[in-house]
Amino acid sequence: MKTATILIVDDEPIARDNLRHILGKDGYTTLLAENGQEAIDLLKEREVDLVLTDLRMRGQDGMAVLSESKKLWPSTEVVVITGYASVDTAVEAMRQGAYHYIAKPFKIDELRVVVEKALEKTSLHREIFHLREQISARSGTSKIIGQSPKIQVLRETILQVAQLDCNVLIQGETGTGKELVARTIHELSPRAGKRFVAFNCGAFTEDLVTSELFGHEQGAFTGAGKTRKGLIEMAEGGTVFFDEVGDMSLSMQVKLLRMLQERTLLRVGGTQEIPVDIRVLAATNKDLKKEAEAGTFRADLFYRLDVIAITIPPLAERRDDIPLLANHFLAKHARQGRIAPRLSEAAAQRLMQYEYPGNIRELENIVQRILFHCDGDIVEPRHLEDDLQGPEPVAIRGRREHWPSLDEHEKQYILEVMDEVEGNKSAAAKILGIDRVSLWRKIKRYGLENPDA
């Protein structure tokens, strides 16, 4: 990667110029930042191939640059430069994601080797990411069925979030497919080779929840005949999905918060802290922010879980996807050895008129009952349940002469959101369910640098 761009961060002008001279002679493009905040601001605007940052700086130090770089550009490697007195701190930086550290004074050949190896790793990360995107385009997010603009945005968000090893809060009404989204995130993430463990927070008593999640030692309680690992420990290196996390008791929320903060757990009856390496995905059909404000959900746990939020639209907001979903379920549940029937236009229109309080789960149940009544190759309105048949709808959707493209839908949607928040990109990104960098890319792509124009 001799054409690579390297960001040099140091508050000493001589040190910056020396690094620029050395790397420039090797053919690299260099960008300079006089302090940590300047580096962070630059990283918010563009991606680089490598960050070389001094560890000790006034204001935002090298650890802050490392943390922000990994959030914004996970595949970009970071090398920290430090004096001998702070080597221990540099080692800690490596634990938090830095590729390597270089102690001052360093040898030029040593610097060149570290830079070359770090760039090779950056290149490999990006190649893996692009391959995973290609594969997911064919298989991964294809499990999320639909062609509506909101589902297209959801798919793109899943692809982006999958690569960020952070907590994710998945919000949506009952039956919208929150666990499917969580599994897809896991399958497209670097943790895909490890276990995905799902746990329903509202399905057990508090004692059972503690034992199931954290495990127990032999003799911890009556019936504990041997030591048993909990679900969190069994998911080591993988992903734990907390379904309906809003139903978790306040005392269990404290235990979960401690595990997220310390990255350790204590088995029931145990005395030794056990380190854990997991990614946490959580789902809820409640407004956890309001729950936190009301005191029924811990605010500190909410902010731990809500690093990135994904909102799944209810089925009533994506009616154009209903025929696609219905035909998918018809094929899935058709009797063995029988060709699945297809929806007639009239039956599809009737299905699209229903409100679906139970969302996709309710639609799947309806399709299974349709198969009980329909023996032919075509599903007609008479095969639908009484509450779905009804009188002929007054406003059946007509055929459009021009259907706007997905890009046009997305562009208009972004414009509306930006107008609503008066150009505040952070607020707009939160509403859109994407990070600020992704929003910035879309603004550039659609030429919306001045959305009010």
Image: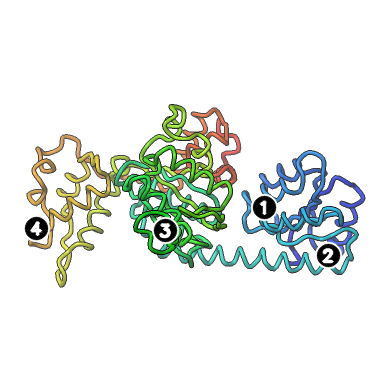
Depth check, front residue: 395 or 127: 127
Depth check, front residue: 216 or 376: 216
Q: CA distance from mark 3 to mark 4?
A: 57 Å
Regarding residue 361, the answer to whether it shows in the image is yes
If you read the primary sequence from the N terminus, does the residue marked by circle 2 or circle 3 appear first? 2
Q: In the drawing, does residue 9 fall left or right of residue 122?
A: right
Q: Which residue, as the protein is rendered here, is positioned at the far bottom?
A: 337
Disc 2 on helix, strand or loop? helix
Kindly identify which residue carries mark 2: 111
Identify which amino acid the numbered label 4 is placed on: Cys
Kindly identify which residue carries mark 3: 219
If you read the primary sequence from the N terminus, does the residue marked by circle 3 or circle 1 appear first? 1
Q: Are marks 3 and 1 in contact (CB under 8 Å)?
A: no
Instruction: Say few, some or many: other residues with alpha carbon within 10 Å of mark 3 (under 14 / 14 to 19 / 20 or more).
Output: few
If you read the primary sequence from the N terminus, does the residue marked by circle 3 or circle 4 appear first? 3
Q: Are marks 2 and 3 in contact (CB under 8 Å)?
A: no
Q: Which residue, as the protein is rendered here, is positioned at the far right?
A: 14
Kindly identify which residue carries mark 1: 47
Instruction: Say few, some or many: other residues with alpha carbon within 10 Å of mark 4 (under 14 / 14 to 19 / 20 or more).
Output: some
Q: Is residue 187 above or below residue 401?
A: below
Identify which amino acid the numbered label 1 is placed on: Glu
Q: CA distance from mark 1 to mark 2?
A: 22 Å
The x and y percentages for residue 412 are 46, 38
Identify which amino acid the numbered label 2 is placed on: Leu
Q: CA distance from mark 4 to mark 1?
A: 56 Å
Kindly identify which residue carries mark 4: 374
Disc 4 on helix, strand or loop? loop
Q: Residue at x 25, y 49 (%)?
A: 361
